[in-house]
């Protein structure tokens, strides 16, 4: 029994090695050329990457956490935001009540300014919901009239709810 298994194993061994013998010399040469091109491209990439990192490391004030330039003022937490540039005396900026999630900024002119919600989120969600509802009410038979009217009304409703939804506090007001 053991000799039969050994004879069977020896008979199948050349059959397993046949794919190796099937590769011709031209295929082997083409494979070696492709590997050489790959190695050359990889070496070029690593050379350029190392050059980039070395150049970047030589610039002292350009990295996060780098020391300031000698004699220069370094205020990493300074911001260029000036609220006075974004707000103006306009009747559209009516006084409103602040909610708990409103943000207040002090402008360079000493006045306090509120970050206002422009209602974009409510506008988008209202338009989508109104469009779907308008399509359902219109019958859903590929009619665009109900979808457009529902989308427009939903957008207006969503925008007004989003802009006026946060007024809860009675004692702090913002203009």
Image (tube, rainbow, N blue to C red):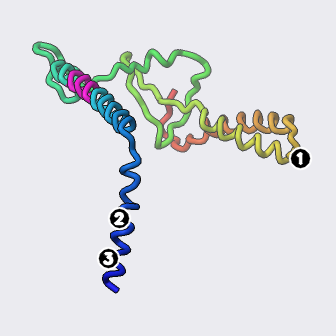
Residue 63 appears at what percent x and percent y?
22, 25
**Discs 1, 3 touching: Cβ within 8 Å:** no
Main secondary structure found in the magenta portion: helix
> Which of the numbered marks, if any, corresponds to residue 126?
none
Give whichever of discs 2 and 1 has the lower sequence position. 2
Residue at 15 percent of width and 14 percent of height: 72
Q: Circle 2: is it few (<14), some (14-19), or many (20+) Cα within 10 Å?
A: few
Q: Quadrant of residue 10?
A: bottom left
Q: Which residue is mark 3?
A: 6
Q: Which contiguous range is marked in magenta?
A: 43-53
Say which residue appears at 50% left-offset and 33% top-offset.
173
The Cα–Cα distance between marks 2 and 3, rounded to whole angstroms, is 11 Å
> In the rendered image, which residue does mark 2 sit on?
13
Query: In 3D space, how far apart are the residues under numbered discs 1 and 3 (Cα atoms)?
Result: 78 Å
Tell whether position 52 is magenta. yes
Measured as percent of width and height from the top left, residue 110 is found at 37, 20
Q: Nearer the viewer, residue 78 or 145?
A: 145
In the rendered image, the residue lying farthest to the bottom is 1
Does the residue at mark 2 contact the one at mark 1 (Cβ under 8 Å)? no
What residue do we see at 85% from left, 38% from top? 146
Q: 40 and 107: which one is in front?
A: 40
Camera sees residue 110: no
């Amino acid at each position: 029994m053991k000799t039969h298994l050994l004879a069977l194993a020896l008979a199948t061994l050349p059959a397993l090695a046949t794919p190796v013998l099937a590769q011709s010399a031209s295929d082997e040469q083409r494979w070696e050329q492709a590997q050489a091109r790959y190695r050359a491209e990889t070496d070029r990439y690593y050379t350029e990457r190392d050059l980039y990192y070395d150049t970047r490391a030589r610039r002292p004030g350009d990295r996060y956490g780098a020391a300031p330039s000698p004699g220069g003022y370094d205020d990493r937490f300074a911001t260029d935001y000036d609220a006075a540039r974004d707000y103006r005396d306009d009747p559209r900026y009516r006084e409103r009540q602040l909610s708990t999630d409103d943000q207040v900024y002090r402008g360079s002119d000493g006045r306090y300014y509120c970050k206002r919600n422009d209602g974009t989120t409510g506008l988008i969600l209202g338009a989508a919901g109104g469009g779907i509802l308008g399509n359902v009410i219109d019958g859903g038979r590929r009619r665009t009239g109900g979808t457009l009217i529902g989308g427009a009304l939903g957008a207006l409703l969503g925008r007004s709810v989003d802009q006026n939804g946060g007024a809860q506090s009675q004692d702090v007001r913002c203009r």
